[in-house]
Amino acid sequence: MLSLVIAEASLELVPKELYRHNAITAYCRKMDKKPSEILLDNSWHFGAMKGLKNEIKRGRPDLVHFCLLEACTIPLYLEDEVSVYVHTIDDKVITVGERVRLPKSYHRFAGIMEQLFEKKVIKSDDQKLFEIQNMSFPDLIDTIEPDQVIGLSSEGKKSSYESVAKMCTDETCLVIGGFPKGEFFDSTKKSIDSLYSVDENQLEAHVVVARTLYEYEKTIFM
């Protein structure tokens, strides 16, 4: 089946260097949690994130939620024609199970992700919903073993959603950035065979996920 990777995703726990920042400690008191138990979120931790390495690519777990909602609520996913992975900016990989019903509420999603970072696996009735492992992007590609890796980026060669979808097969790995701004790291680009730009505008990741998967869906269902 087609593999979709949301790469360098803006999904991580609060890094240790921010534990003592006032914005973090205040939020932890409000949520009655430790800094090591909460997601880094720009909406709440903007002040703490100033000057953080790769700041513009971090602190937006809501983008990952949007991407997963787009990927996991469509016929392609429900018919087991796409496998979904999230590679995070700090080199962890979340494998999404088959036919997972994602919560529509972001707050519920964030809670599940915080549990996942702690427990490493989330199950329901013995079905594995999510699993997280320490893994780099190149290692994930080696694990998937695709025939080709296609990445979508504004830096890529001009193309279209339809054209990229027609290039994809059930042995393809499709890579879309899960961050708000910036470009793929060089280490990620080295594992991508072909890089394409599918829109004149810099659209949010979930829009690119939705449009590309829809065009691919049309090639196998219509």
Image (cartoon, rainbow, N blue to C red):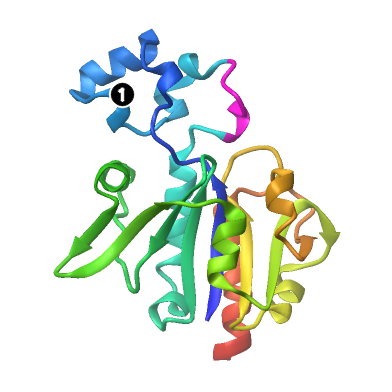
Say which residue appears at 22% left-offset and 25% top-offset: 31
- On the question of residue 202 being in view, the answer is no
Residue 67, percent across and down? 49, 55
Residue 190, percent across and down? 75, 55
Label 1: how many residues lie within 10 Å, few (<14), some (14-19) or many (20+)? many
Q: Please give left or right for residue 184 compared with residue 62 in the image.
A: right
Residue 45, placed above or below residue 159: above
- On the question of residue 95 being in view, the answer is yes
Q: Please give left or right for residue 98 compared with residue 212 in the image.
A: left
How many discs mark residues in the rendered view? 1
Magenta segment range?
Answer: 51-57
Q: Which residue is mark 1?
A: 35
Residue 89, percent across and down? 54, 41
Q: Please give left or right for residue 3 compared with residue 45 in the image.
A: right
Q: Indicate the secondary structure of the residue bearing disc 1.
A: helix
The image quadrant of residue 218 is: bottom right
